[in-house]
Image (cartoon, grey):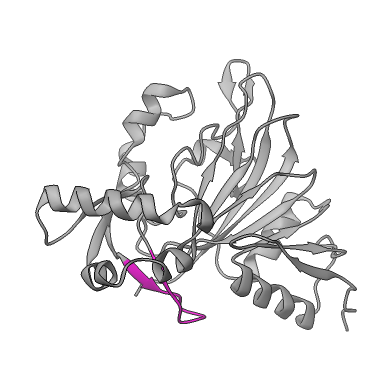
């Protein structure tokens, strides 16, 4: 059966990254040529915003899988019932219990950088939005690398750093109800890994910084005080305003970002306002 192409536009943002897709319906199958356009836009712009997507969780999963295998988040308590591939990101409490991960993205990070195969990309679908707040910020790590002073580029290229999911878990757990105690099985899923401080994008060949304040704990092979100072410098440089796009959500947005090229941060939602989002995460490759 031949799948018809759709008439849609890709409109780049006037920002450090990002583009919106208008006129595309992801509730219907995509033709090969339409998928190729979206794939190219994702590589070119790093964040692609699909407007007004009235899709089901199964349709989100199906579209996500076209880019690769999906990864299941370690906090399986917050899986969408019937759809373990979907992580519920929400500040909503029902009967006093959280229905999702309410403090996701509290610190700048790249999703699942603490895994041997970090995420290629994540897709977040707006199911219920607050009247205010709830923005997501994205920082362009290609731009951060390109604008790093040459002497610092030379210093960090070839270095490796430790990433661990547990780096700030206790801190988050002390601040909110969203972080359950982890079981031994969950802890075993998130053992620390070493990643390059500078990674090369496997599809474009572009270099990007690959450290974050949330998951990166130390640079290996240098003294601890030097490691702390170096990471602090890289963290601050990475998220300078000129590298950042701030996404203000619209109803039914589906946002697809490239974790190999970006960091992101949740700006926060007022406690009294509801926010419900569904996230799928695509497995990437071993960073090089």
Question: Residue at 72% of width from left, 53% of height from top?
Answer: 254
Query: Is 206 included in the stretch rendered in magenta?
Result: yes
Residue 128 horizontal side relative to residue 22, left or right: left
**How far across and how far down the image is residue 130, in percent?**
72, 30
Question: Residue at 69% of width from left, 23% of height from top?
Answer: 273
Q: Is residue 52 visible?
A: yes
Quadrant that contains the N terminus: bottom right
**How far across and how far down the image is residue 45, in percent?**
62, 68
The image quadrant of residue 195 is bottom left
Residue 119 horizontal side relative to residue 7, left or right: left
Residue 189 horizontal side relative to residue 229, left or right: right
**How far across and how far down the image is residue 276, in percent?**
68, 36
Q: Is residue 192 visible?
A: no
Q: Is residue 202 above or below residue 47?
A: below
State which region is magenta: 198-209
Question: Residue at 80% of width from left, 53% of height from top?
Answer: 55
Q: Nearer the viewer, residue 4 or 241?
A: 241
Residue 209 horizontal side relative to residue 59, left or right: left
Name, please, the residue furthest toward the top.
Answer: 96
């Amino acid at each position: 059966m031949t799948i018809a192409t759709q008439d849609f536009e890709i409109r780049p943002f006037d920002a450090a990254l990002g583009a919106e897709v208008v006129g595309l319906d992801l509730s219907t199958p995509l033709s090969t040529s339409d998928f190729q356009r979206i794939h190219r836009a994702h590589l070119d712009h790093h964040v692609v915003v699909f407007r007004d997507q009235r899709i089901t969780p199964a349709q989100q999963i199906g579209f996500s899988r076209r880019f690769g295998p999906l990864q299941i988040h370690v906090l399986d308590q917050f899986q969408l019932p019937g759809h373990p591939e979907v992580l519920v990101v929400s500040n909503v409490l029902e009967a006093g219990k959280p229905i999702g991960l309410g403090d996701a993205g509290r610190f700048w990070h790249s999703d699942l950088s603490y895994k041997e195969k970090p995420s290629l990309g994540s897709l977040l679908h707006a199911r219920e939005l607050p009247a205010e707040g709830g923005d997501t910020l994205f920082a362009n790590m290609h731009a951060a690398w390109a604008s790093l002073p040459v002497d610092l580029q030379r210093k960090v290229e070839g270095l490796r750093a430790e990433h661990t999911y547990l780096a700030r878990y206790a801190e988050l757990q002390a601040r909110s109800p969203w972080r359950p105690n982890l079981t031994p099985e969950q802890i075993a899923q998130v053992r620390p890994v070493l990643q390059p401080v500078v990674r090369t994008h496997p599809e474009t060949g572009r270099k990007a910084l690959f450290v974050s304040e949330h998951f990166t704990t130390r640079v290996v092979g240098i003294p601890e005080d030097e490691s702390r100072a170096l990471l602090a410098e890289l963290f601050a440089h990475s998220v300078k305003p000129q590298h950042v796009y701030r996404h203000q959500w619209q109803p039914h947005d589906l946002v697809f970002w490239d974790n190999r090229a970006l960091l992101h941060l949740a700006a926060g939602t007022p406690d009294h306002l509801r926010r419900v989002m569904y996230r799928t995460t695509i497995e990437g490759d071993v960073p090089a």
